[in-house]
Amino acid sequence: MSEVSLLDHALVRLDEAAKHLNVDADVIEKLKFARETTKARLMIRMDDGSRKSFLAWRCRYDDTRGPTKGGIRFHPESTADEVEMLAFWMTFKCAVMNLPYGGGKGAVQVDPRKLSKAELERLSRAYIQAFARIIGPDRDIPAPDVYTNSMIMGWMADEYAQIVGQASPGVITGKPLALGGSLGRGDATARGGFYLVRHLAEELGLKGSLRIAVQGFGNAGQHIARLLASDGHKIVAVSDSEGAVRAAGGLDLDRLFVAKDAGRSVVTTAGQGGHELLDGAALVGVDCDILVPSALENMIRIDNADLVKARIVLELANGPVTAEADAILEKKGVVVLPDILANAGGVTVSYFEWVQNRQGYYWPIEEIHERLRTIMEREGRAIWDVAKAKDVSVRTAAYVHALARLAEAIEAHGTQNYFAS
């Protein structure tokens, strides 16, 4: 671990929010550290008969407001430090949306693209075997994240059911529909961001047909492109891990979807339908109205933030803008709609899935969309009002909004002032 950890960088947001609230020191002390982080080594049998081990973690950051909630990612560069940082963000994201959850996160240090499907299933089940005592529908509820999907969640839920001896669909969200998943989960992250932008369009100065650039054309990136295009806007550039394409008049989304469905990069569409090849790193500097980072953390940094031409940055990825880049964007007048608000549609619909699992009654898609829209607009409006009232960035306002709820819950257990009186 570096001298200054990833969590330390994330805690800068907590310190900034605390300046704008009168919270007890007990609150900050509790939120500076993860409640528990468990490490395991998963040993699985490979298809060739050999055995291989993989490092894995599960972090429960804070459960003051309810059971912890957060995804499991499979990524070759995952670390315990990263997992704790992501769990910290989830703590604030759940508080922003007023969900009865704390924050959690999990990861396996693996490149899943190098595993067969059978090996991937064995790894997924091994994760649950290792962490079955940590998770539970009333304790810690995992979900999909980077390089995990509904099939993997289905394997994990099944393994947990075998361990506890009964069906327990509420232990994991993001499952296939046939195994207790919820309608609307697939595009929830993007749809939440879409509802937020549409609700705040007047305040953000967004009118008419907008030009959109999407960094990271995975699940969230594809869905936000589809939603915004259906609303009359132009997707002028998209990127994935292999590069980017652009078209000033708007990209041919159907062509891009066909390429991605076939397992190919967006760059394979260059030269077709007016698509021009673009270096992936240059996408942040594309001339557009809204830039949508939908890939990994730290994609907009001190070295490229000044290139951003967009008026709005909609963070569908977790932590795509560093604190240093935030300061640069603020000076440029760029409004950042922060991850703990903008991409919270995913955890909100995961919450809906958990509620439906527990009551054994499943809602129609129209009800899910309406419930999501209501929550995104309510919390988005509240945060916008905080930003204006306190003259702070929308990100700081989101952290202030969340910290107020967390502080109320933590202080309800008693603080130094209570015990010293």
Image (cartoon, grey):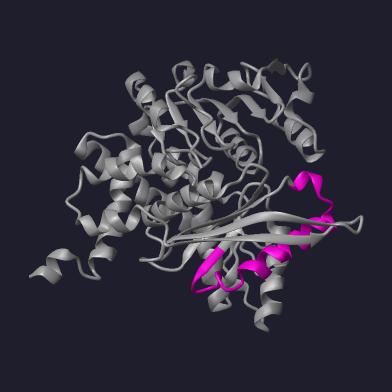
In depth, the one of 370 and 413 nearer the eye is: 413
- Specify the quadrant that holds the C terminus: bottom left
Q: Is 127 within the magenta?
A: yes
Q: Please, is residue 59 above or below residue 190 in the view?
A: below
Q: Residue at x 58, y 70 (%)?
A: 171
Percent x, y of residue 115: 81, 50
| Residue 292 shows in the view | yes
Q: Which residue is drawn at 37% across and 30% down?
A: 204
Query: Is 224 positioned to the left or the right of 279 in the image?
Result: left
Query: Is 320 positioned to the left or the right of 332 in the image?
Result: right
Q: Which residue is drawn at 53% across and 32% down?
A: 292
| Residue 154 shows in the view | no
Q: State how many labels appear.
A: 0
Of all residues, the one furthest to the right in this rendering is 48
Q: Give the range drawn in magenta.
A: 112-141
Q: Please, is residue 303 above or below residue 94 in the view?
A: above
Q: Please, is residue 193 above or below residue 253 in the view?
A: below
Q: Please, is residue 160 above or below residue 374 in the view?
A: below
Q: Which residue is drawn at 34% across and 55% down?
A: 31
Q: Is 298 within the magenta?
A: no
- The quarter of the displayed image where residue 412 is located: bottom left
Percent x, y of residue 101: 43, 64
- The quarter of the displayed image where residue 19 is located: top left
